[in-house]
Each structure stands twice: as structure tokens, then as C-alpha cells.
Amino acid sequence: MRKIVAVPIALAGLALASPASAFSAFHNWNFCTQNSFEVCMDFDLLRDGATNDYQLTVTFVSSMGGPGEEGVMTAAGIYRMSASPDLDVSDVVVISPLTWVVGSGGLSGGGAVTFEVASNSGSGVTDGLGVGESVVVRFTSTNLATYNMEDLFARSHVQSLGPESCSIKPDSRLPGNLVDGVTEVNERCGGPTTSVPEPMTMVLLASGLLGVGAVRIRRRRDGVEADQA
């Protein structure tokens, strides 16, 4: 009789000791840069029930860089404008990949960074995440549940992008979804180039111009002869 009673008590104790996580959708930032490489990011923020625990998954969705030139994500985080209310965030921890760390200062470019996580890129790009890969972060916030999410923005850092091995910062708030703007980034990273005419095209163009010149000379000469007559 004691064995039958003991089993449910033990199971109940185990359930209390290890409550199941119940993360559900809370907010999402999904955007693509408007420059020639069109880097796309997805920031998916979840909340654990009605608690103060949150999980952010940042995915490097896609890039128009050529093979081997798609770039790698080396930092990600969220920020607010300096004039916006403060957001209380604590206990930030990287769940995966374990090689990433909290904080690096690589997301500068306006606004007050709430938190940031980054790869080990102190000497060159290492542990960066390629297209399709994600970084998962958990943290606690006492006022995020009631915060105006229109005052909160997402930013990442992508390096080794394109033939120039360029560095850009995709951003959910800024025009073109880029720190520094579309035009400057295209010029720095190798934007669309003006096509160079093929040799045969140049020959045809030159022939046409010579023909037009010959017609004009002949008309002018005929006009002079007519006047003399």
C-alpha cells in the first residue's frame, strides 16, 4: 500500500522541481537591408508564460552575396532611442552557440543598446554564424511586458560580405534598414556596377557616328555648290 501512495507523491515532487518551460510568441522584427546584398534578418522574441523570462532567437535568414561571399553574423542585440523610457534587462545569457558572449560594443550607430551578444571576433572573424544559423539568448526583464515595443529596435552585425569582405549593420529602424545608409554601403561594399559595352558594340557605335558626320559634311558641301551656281 505504501508503494502505491509513494509513486504519485514522488512524481508530483519531480514536477514541482522541474516546471515545464512555456515560451510563446511575444514580438518579432523581420527585415531585409535595401542595399545590393539584401541581407535578411529575423529577431523572434518569446515570453515564458506570464513571468519576466524571455528568449530571443536571431537568425541570419539570407544574403545576396555570391558563393562564399554571403557573410557571417558576428553580433546581434536590441536597443532603444536615448529619449525612450529605460528598459530593465538582467541575467542575459547565451544559450547557443556557447562560443558567443554577452556584450562587445560592436553594435554602435545610434540609440542606447539594451543588450548585445557577439562571436569571438577579437582577431578576425571567428565563430560567426552563416546564412540559416541562429543565436539564442535568454534574459529577464521586469517591464518588457508593458513596454511600448515601437520604442524597441533590432540590430545585427554582418562581416566578410561580398568581394570586398565588407562589414554592415542591418537595422530594423533606419532607412534602408542599414546603419550608414544604402548609398554609402553600396559604394563601400561594392554595389551594382555600370556595365561596360562590348568591343563590337563600341565598333558599331563609332561607325554610326562616322556615318552621321559624313552625311552632314556632304549636305554642307552640296549647299555650298548650290549657292555658287
Image (cartoon, rainbow, N blue to C red):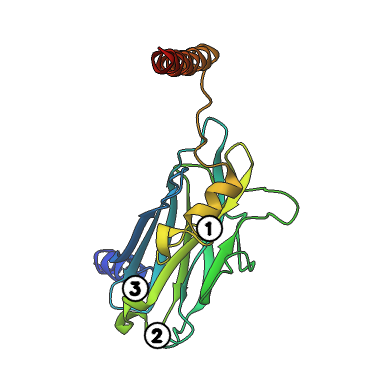
Residue topped by disc 3: 16
Q: Which label lies toward us, 2 or 1? A: 1
The answer to whether mark 2 and mark 1 are in CB contact below 8 A is no
User: Element under label 2?
Assistant: loop
Residue topped by disc 2: 142
Q: Amino acid at mark 2?
A: Thr
Q: Is residue 192 above or below residue 10?
A: above
Residue topped by disc 1: 169
Give the number of marks.
3
Q: Is residue 152 left or right of residue 162?
A: left
Q: Which label lies toward us, 3 or 2? A: 2
Q: Could you tell me residue 180's position as x and y percent?
A: 54, 61
User: Element under label 1?
Assistant: loop
Give the farthest residue toward the front. Answer: 229
Q: Amino acid at mark 1?
A: Lys
User: Element under label 3?
Assistant: helix
